[in-house]
Image: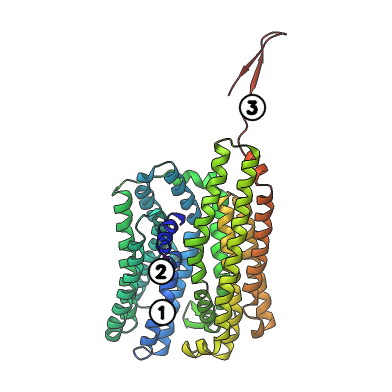
Amino acid sequence: MAGIGFRLQKLLASGSFTDLIRAYFYSSIIATGPLLVVIVSLAIIRATIQGSLETADSNLFQSLIIYIFAFSLIGVGPVMYIVTRYIADRYYLKQAYLFTPTFLFVLQVVFIFQTIVAILFLLRLDLPFGTKWLVYILYLFINGIWIAMLFLSASRDYLWIVFAFAFGAVFGCAAAIHMGRAHGLSGFLAGYTLGQGITFLTLTIRIFFEFGLSLSYDYGVLTYLKKYPYLVLVGVFYNLGIWIDKLIFWHSNLGETVAPGLKIYSNYDTPMFLAFITIVPSMAFFLIQMETSFVQHYHGYYQSVRERADLGTIRAKREAILDNLTEHFQRFVLFQGIISGLVIMFVYQIADAFHLNPYQMGVFRIGILGSFLQMGFLILLNILFYFDLQKDAFYVCLIYFILNTVLTLVTLRIGFSAYGFGYTGACLIAVVAAFLLLNRKLQALNYWTFMRQPILIPKFKFENEETVVLQEK
């Protein structure tokens, strides 16, 4: 996303407050993608649903949307970082013409896999056939949006991306409200599906405009599965780690059955989703300020290595990276700390606005801290990727997943007063582990940079006792 970040950063050059707001608004939509859109859309539709649907159908609609986003992220996870690495390499090699063939191939693979997942899931639900079809189509649209955003990280036109999400959200809400009043649950679902379909179609068109229209497939990304297995594992365990606490609550004795085979726990889900919104400004900050600034120092260091600069210059470049990361991480802590503090300060007003009960308010407070820590973890994970520390990234994601699982199960046994501490504790330990691993590597960056390079091993051929012919591989 650094490419888009550099383009958004131009808005900040004017120094005007209006451009600052625009830059953060655009980057918030781009950085969070459909997650922010679904939360805002659900809030709007939920307010409308109350007078148009029975409570059972209202809960069913929201639950279906939540499940769709949860399993789409988990399902796309295994290919997410592999595809990102592949297209990044193609971009570096000036092979952007392979983006569209790769997009079409990955999209087909994901659709086939997720169709199997959807069939297995929908067979368990006692819903009308038409409703199941709408759920299936919406599920594919959301998966398509995740995949499209991987490729559009190299896009030159960020306004198109913003338009795709904004227009899709507005159209989806309007269509859901209009059709829902006439046709109930299926109408709300159909309208919302249309909105997400428009977003997916608009993003796909942008890919064709940006990288060319090609109906061929590129299978090169398959070679990366063997070349970078840790990227697959990172995608699996990071996304499972995000959702495992919710899945545990859904399938515990506390789970509320909204339909056969479909369970939620609103006292945990609602406050956690609201807590996620509090880190949206930090996602924007990372995109347009922290990552773009870091990338400049990152390229400066490796350029000095490639140009065979003297050791003093290389050491100075390494120190510049450390200083830059330290400064911007401190800014993130201060920036997000102020936001989280303000939200906690006005928690009662927020609770009234979103109709949170006293139980949900407690989870919301701890969820705000957990989201704060998760954003810190996400930043550190991205920096690990920049230095190609894939194994370390896998370790911290595995730790995150295991701890969120174990600690959530522990909090279930303790009782309601502990709910949310499992997720927050897992995020805290993951942040500490990621920081220690990254700091260790950065302190010895020069060593790792040179010692990880392939070494040319010469072959010796002894022709006689006095002559040795050196042959290169």
Judge left or right: residue 268 versus residue 416. left
Viewport quadrant of the N terminus: bottom left
Near mark 3 (Cα within 10 A), the count class, few <14, some 14-19 or many ≥20, is: few
Q: Which residue is mark 2?
A: 16
Residue labelled with disc 3: 457
Q: x and y percent of residue 327 in the render? A: 60, 61
- Give the label on residue 304, or none: none
In this picture, residue 292 sits left or right of residue 254: left
- Mark 1 lies on a secondary structure that is helix
Q: Amino acid at mark 3?
A: Ile
Please, which residue is most extreme toward the right here? 465
CB atoms at circles 3 and 2 under 8 Å apart?
Answer: no
Q: Secondary structure at mark 2?
A: loop
Camera sees residue 24: yes
Q: Nearer the viewer, mark 1 or mark 2?
A: 2
Residue range (magenta):
15-21
Q: Amino acid at mark 2?
A: Ser
Q: Earlier in the sequence, mark 1 or mark 3?
A: 1
Residue 403 colored in magenta in the image: no
Would you name the residue on which mark 1 appears?
A: 42
- In the figure, is residue 83 to the left or right of 157? right
Mark pair 3, 2: CA separation: 58 Å
